[in-house]
Image: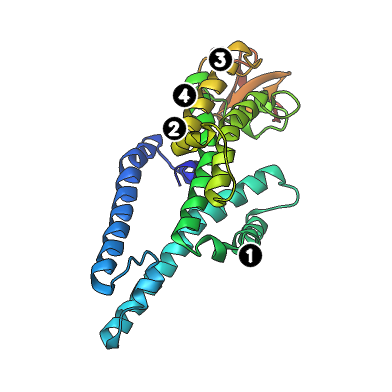
Amino acid sequence: MATNVPDFTRYMKRSKGVYWQAFFLPIISIILGMYGIIATSAARVVYGSYIWDPVELAAQWDGPSGRCGAFFVGLCWCIAQIGTNLSANVISCSNDMVGLFPKYINIRRGVIITTIIGGWVMVPWKIIHSAASLLSFMSGLAIFLAPIAAILASDYWVVKRKAVDVPALYRKHGRYYYRHGSNWRAAVAFIISVTPNTPGLAHAVNSSIKLSGGIQHVYDMFYLYGFTSAFVVYVSLSWIFPPADVKIPKAIHEAITVVDGIEAINDGLNTTKAAGRKAGSFDEKVPAETDVESV
């Protein structure tokens, strides 16, 4: 869920609140994993076998109190599943589809498409059929999420040094359009990160697939390799082949307008001309009534 945080932090009023995730996310993950281990181990003592599935564990509870407990546990489990899928899957995927196809897809349509794909096309009942299949699926997600997280982090903190032109992110042909509408440096970093982990993932899902050499051991540290390799490759390519007109001295958060062909900031009282496309010196005041063209 860490890679889905921007889908919600975009609505925050203060940027400092985002740092709380660094404290709460690891703690919550550790607590959930610890409770799962405790419950599974306790099932071995009480029922004679390791029961990792909470639904199957609740089915062992007999009597009026047991059935009552199973009902409330099942209710909580359903609410947790709905909340997790809404926050980590449905909303984030819908936002992505709206960004890719805004003319045809809105949030509501994106939610419907995501629900159909996640609830039926991906046959989730096979994924949770056993503990081994569930762990293989979760590991498979990580080999794709690790390079994505690395590219996002390296681009913001290292390459752009937190200096981002926010309005330009929403322009079709803005400064972040890159070459032919895609950042090839990110694509190369993603491929280099994912490719060595793919054979190990195939072997984890289907043990009959035999691997030669030490390629299978790369998958044993898939997240460390995936994150580190994507981070280093993306930063290196951005340094060797710097994209033109992307780096700016400071972040731009204001709404940008155009006055006489020059980018400017309109604060409602005055329209301040900017020196070229770069952020920094705003030295000429123009009355707000000036005819400006919003970008």
Name the residue located 28 percent from the left edge and 71 percent from the top edge.
48
Mark nearest the camera among 3 and 2 is: 2
Q: Which amino acid does label 2 sit on?
A: Leu
Residue under numbered circle 2: 224
Quadrant (top left/top right/bottom left/bottom right) for the C terminus: top right
Mark 3 / mark 2, whichever is N-terminal = 2
User: Horizontal and vertical percent for residue 8?
Assistant: 48, 46
Mark 4 and mark 3: span between their CA atoms? Answer: 25 Å
Name the residue located 69 percent from the left edge and 21 percent from the top edge.
259
Front one among 182 and 6: 182
Q: Residues within 10 Å of mark 1 (few under 14, many from 20)?
A: few
Residue under numbered circle 3: 282
Q: Which amino acid does label 4 sit on?
A: Trp
Mark nearest the camera among 4 and 1 is: 1
Residue 247 in sight from this viewpoint:
no
Circle 2 — which element? helix
Mark 4 and mark 1: span between their CA atoms? Answer: 38 Å
Residue under numbered circle 1: 120
Mark nearest the camera among 2 and 4 is: 2
CB under 8 Å between callouts 2 and 1? no
Circle 1 — which element? helix
Q: Residues within 10 Å of mark 2 (few under 14, many from 20)?
A: some
Mark 2 and mark 4: span between their CA atoms? Answer: 19 Å
Circle 4 — which element? helix
Mark 4 / mark 3, whichever is N-terminal = 4
242 up-or-down from 207: above or below: above
User: Horizontal and vertical percent for residue 135?
Assistant: 46, 53
